[in-house]
Image: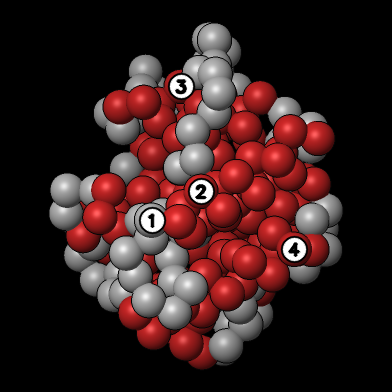
Amino acid sequence: MPSLADWSRHLRQVAQPVLEASPRPAGFATGPLDPPLLAVLDGVDPGPAPSPLSADEIGLWWRRALDPGAAATGELLDRVRTSNAADRAVDGGGALLPRDLYSAIEVWTDAELAALHAWWWLAEAADDDDARAHLARIRDWHLEHTQPDNATNRPWAIHVFLLGATPEHEHYAATLLHNGLAMDGVPTPLGARLLRDAADAIDRAAALPAP
């Protein structure tokens, strides 16, 4: 298996040409996720946040945009965990977001992985071991129950899987990366930023020196 340092370098190399070509996109065409994504990934003022923050991927990205280290972060993570558990339509403790709230499995998968991507950063910022453990359980559930193939072309949560540190985790992450490059062989502007963000997460988790 490549090392985490190898993966971090590879993600940055894939992302860099697109980042240089599109230094500041106007938006990512992801609907209500655009404001917090632009805030986190490009430093754009997101405008006023919704209140209260929703217990889904949108709320998690908003919390990351607002102040990921705030005390409210832990409260939101707890609310996401408990409110979604009440009506989650999957087995085994399963995923973070209820599948039956989304119109298609592809839409749910994209939202689920977007939520896991943000959750990792929030758990780290809050230094929350319970949130880290919950994320690891969800990640490993996905290895058994979902297929990343063609479900999303956005490379959400690659770092979450790579940090699982097994060949199965790496294969899942590599498939997400492949899907993000399948159309033109390069990531979209959003995909490039997610890859850079994932590389930053890997560097932080593995205590690698900054590039």
Alpha carbon of mark 3 to alpha carbon of mark 4: how far? 28 Å
Give, as a three-letter code, the residue at label 4: Asp
| Mark 3 to mark 1 CA distance (whole Å) | 28 Å
Q: Distance of mark 3 from mark 2, alpha carbons?
A: 24 Å
What residue did someone put label 4 on?
130
Q: Which residue is mark 1?
A: 87
How many other residues sit within 10 Å of disc 1, few (<14), some (14-19) or many (≥20)?
A: few
Q: Earlier in the sequence, mark 3 or mark 2?
A: 3
3 or 1: mark nearer the eye: 1
Say few, some or many: other residues with alpha carbon within 10 Å of mark 3 (under 14 / 14 to 19 / 20 or more): many
Q: Residue at x 57, y 54 (%)?
A: 81
Q: Is residue 61 above or below residue 86?
A: above
Could you tell which of marks 3 and 4 lies nearer the N-terminus? 3
Q: Position of residue 114 (x, y in %)?
A: 44, 49
Decide: marks 4, 1 in contact (CB < 8 A)? no
What residue is shown at x 69% (from left), y 70% (from top)? 133
Q: Earlier in the sequence, mark 4 or mark 1?
A: 1
Q: Amino acid at mark 3?
A: Pro
Front residue of 1/155: it is 155
Please tell me how crowded label 4 is: few (under 14), some (14-19), or many (20+) other residues with Cα within 10 Å.
few
Of circles 3 and 2, the one toward us is: 2
Total numbered badges shown on the rendered structure: 4
User: Residue beneath label 3, please?
Assistant: 35
- Residue 188: percent from left, percent from top: 32, 43
Residue 96, given in percent of the width and then of the height, sits at 47, 59
Q: Quadrant of residue 17?
A: top left
> What's under tag 1, amino acid-wise?
Asp
| Mark before the other along the chain sequence, 2 or 4 | 2
> Image quarter for residue 175?
bottom left
